[in-house]
Amino acid sequence: MTSNQAADSIPDWPTACGLSTDHNTCLIPPMIGGIRFEYTHRVVAGTVAILTLILAFLVAATEKRKLAKRLGWTALLLVICQAVLGGIRVLYRFPEVTATAHAILAQIYFMTVVGLALYLSPWWQRELPMVDDNVTPSARSVAAWTTAVIFCQLILGAAFRHGALPLTPHLIGAGAVTATVVLTGIIVKKRFRQVRELRRAMIALHACFGIQLLLGGWAMWAVDASQNEAQPTLAYVIPTVAHVLGGALTFAASLVVTLACYRMIRPPVAIPANTAQGVKA
């Protein structure tokens, strides 16, 4: 919707009258121009909200673990807040703030659902071999920091996409993400090469991140090449949308790595100084 410059095509919310003359009862606007993109966005968002409602009630009815229930209700609360924030974006404009916040909240919702899906999976619930990691920095902390850095990069990307920030902070963030992803890969592969789950999770993260770098270059080329175009073209829309999708998938892959580390790696054990001295003696 943003790539097609269709964000302001429907002037009202929660109804969607668009260009209809009946602004009191209209729910389906005429599918012309940018309206079809924004209306489709609303339909998809409504579908996600309904599915999240069903998910929350199913988890509450079938799960005994409190954390699972909390994640289900949190996802429902987030999707409701996302809908309200989308309405604020339509009614009060200020896309630099409202659209950026809308994009950030979408990533938080996505993170919650991905975490819930992993927590509900049979893999998480079965007995898994635990490994030790008493080296500083620990793999758990490095993976968590990588996920946090990627989230900050998504914030910078959303701010650039909606006109709140220039491109430079986003490029700096890309460098920070590269450093943390590479560091996480070195640590996990060096210390836990024999742990298949952690190794596969890192492969997925590196694959997503590598593709995202390529998509980022493609998107920058598309933005530069389309500056003189009167209307957005597919050559512009496809790479910019793909880059947004790639960022979300990289974020999800990093979250899975982090959660897998916390599931399979024991917390570092602090060795008292006097004990270490006694052993040395």
Image (tube, rainbow, N blue to C red):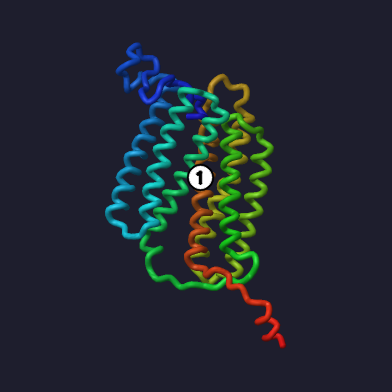
Give the residue at the far right of this rendering.
281
Q: Which of the 4 image quadrants contains residue 44? A: top left
Q: Which residue is mark 1?
A: 248
Secondary structure, mark 1, is: helix
Q: Which of the 4 image quadrants contains residue 214? A: top right
Which amino acid, by three-letter code, is at mark 1?
Ala
Q: Position of residue 105 (x, y in %)?
A: 49, 40
In the displayed structure, would residue 142 be above or below residue 78?
below
In the displayed structure, would residue 20 be above or below residue 139?
above
In the displayed structure, would residue 112 be above or below residue 196?
above
Q: Quadrant of the C terminus?
A: bottom right
Q: Nearer the viewer, residue 128 or 90?
A: 90
Q: Which of the 4 image quadrants contains residue 231? A: top right
Give the residue at the far top of this rendering.
21
Residue at x 62%, y 34% (from the top left corner): 221
Q: Position of residue 216 (x, y in %)?
A: 60, 41
- Would residue 236 appear left or right of 90 to someone viewing this image? right
Q: Position of residue 242 (x, y in %)?
A: 51, 39
Residue at x 58%, y 33% (from the top left corner): 161
Give the residue at the far front of this rendering.
274
